[in-house]
Amino acid sequence: MIFIGLQPSLAAGDAVATGTRVGGDENRTRFVADISKTVNYSVYVLPDPYRVVIDLPNVTFDLPPGIGQKVRGLVSQYRYGQVEEGKSRIVIDTQGPVLIEKSFLVDPQPGQPARLVVDLVKTTEKAFVKSYNSEQAKLQQDIAALSAEPLAPPAAEKKIILPNKRGKKIIVLDPGHGGIDPGAISRAGTKEKDVVLSFASVLRKALLATGKYEVVMTRSDDRFISLRNRVTVARDKNADLFLAIHADTVRGKDARGVTLYTLSEKASDAEAEALAKRENRADIIGGLDLEAETEEITDILIDLAQRESKNHAMFFSKKAVSHLKPLTLMTGKPLRSAGFMVLKAPDVPSVLLELGFLSSESDEKLLTSAAWQTKIAKAFATAMDAYFATELASTAN
């Protein structure tokens, strides 16, 4: 069930969330957020995994570290942060299917902040699905009623690639996850979002040092960016190469090493397919519902099939593997493919780099080593030099 709360406009300035708490039991649980002033909000549930999403305007969070890890009742954990310009979000993971019994705002009183209250009740999977489907159908009807034109999925934009007048190749580096989405977490607490941002920064420095590249980062700090917006950066910049950077976890401690993935509608193996499914859920973890993207992504795949982007991505991946093998451990299958959403930028050769596995203590030591990051970054810079040199020679012939 979707609840939307509207309050009168107040004085300028961002609201600040100064406290949160959870009370109740495994049948009924209340979530409360203290906010410096009343704000507009919406709250709704999403499945797979079960969670409650609270969307807010640009709210700043001044909360104690780790507060979202204190579980109680129906709540297993919660996280918060800015998801886009002017929009903040609280994502509450639940122990199972829940429904929103009610939500409301309590106006601030002298010496007391405003309070946003969300009451959750336990439900069955069947009841959850029925309620969720009903709300989705109603939402679509409401959207259609507001439009004079029939709803239709947006068509994939046909992009004309312009020459790079400065003569430098444009590389887009995409450190995965960020903000309210930590990505994989090792047993020692190392977060994927931190590791990949650190490596991307080192790689950016190595590429700039060659004087051959213009380097664009999809994020340069700890913020959440949707998969669609990551792809948009590559397209808007007319990138010559897009490199998504990740560091996954798997069950057990045996899996180790570097892997490079390119886009394919059919995964090269079961492990690649499982990884793509996990990474493609990044927006869902952030609280976004990607159902509306299906048709657009289908159009993009058709567009991709008519172009050489995937071939160029595979060619670069082979170059990278040849430069990395003498320096670090690679997985048994260092070249793989799967349907990664973040690789679906038309006209842009796109590769996903798995630096290693945070489930491996040995890999974790390398991933957090400045010396290892520098060594691997230099190898990638050399691989890019070789790739573009070969590409230019091929074009000349």
Image: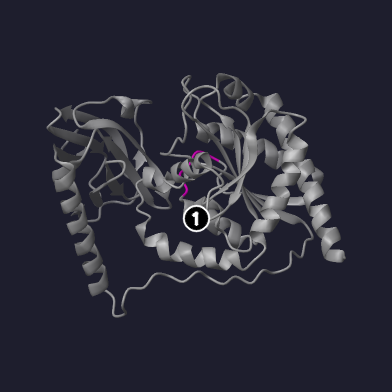
Magenta stretch secondary structure, dominant: loop
- The correct choice, above or below, for 106 with respect to 133 in the image is above
Q: Residue at x 60, y 57 (%)?
A: 234
At which x and y percent is residue 354? Answer: 59, 37
Crowding at dot 1, Cα within 10 Å, few <14 / some 14-19 / many 20+, comes out as few
Any part of residue 108 in sight:
no
Is 251 part of what is drawn in magenta? no
Q: Nearer the viewer, residue 234 or 208?
A: 234
Q: Residue at x 80, y 47 (%)?
A: 385
Residue 208 relative to residue 179: left or right:
right
Any part of residue 337 in sight:
yes
Q: Residue at x 50, y 55 (%)?
A: 229
- The correct choice, above or below, for 225 with respect to 195 in the image is below
At which x and y percent is residue 309? Answer: 65, 60
Q: Quadrant where the C terminus lies?
A: bottom right
Q: Nearer the viewer, residue 238 or 245?
A: 245
Q: Residue at x 44, y 42 (%)?
A: 278
Residue type, label 1: Asn
Quarter assignment of residue 290: bottom left
Which residue of the protein is positioned furthest toward the front in this rendering?
269
At which x and y percent is residue 346? Answer: 59, 63
Residue 277 relative to residue 381: left or right:
left
Magenta residues span 221-225
Residue tagged 1? 229
- The correct choice, above or below, for 284 with respect to 346 in the image is above
Q: Nearer the viewer, residue 339 or 122?
A: 339
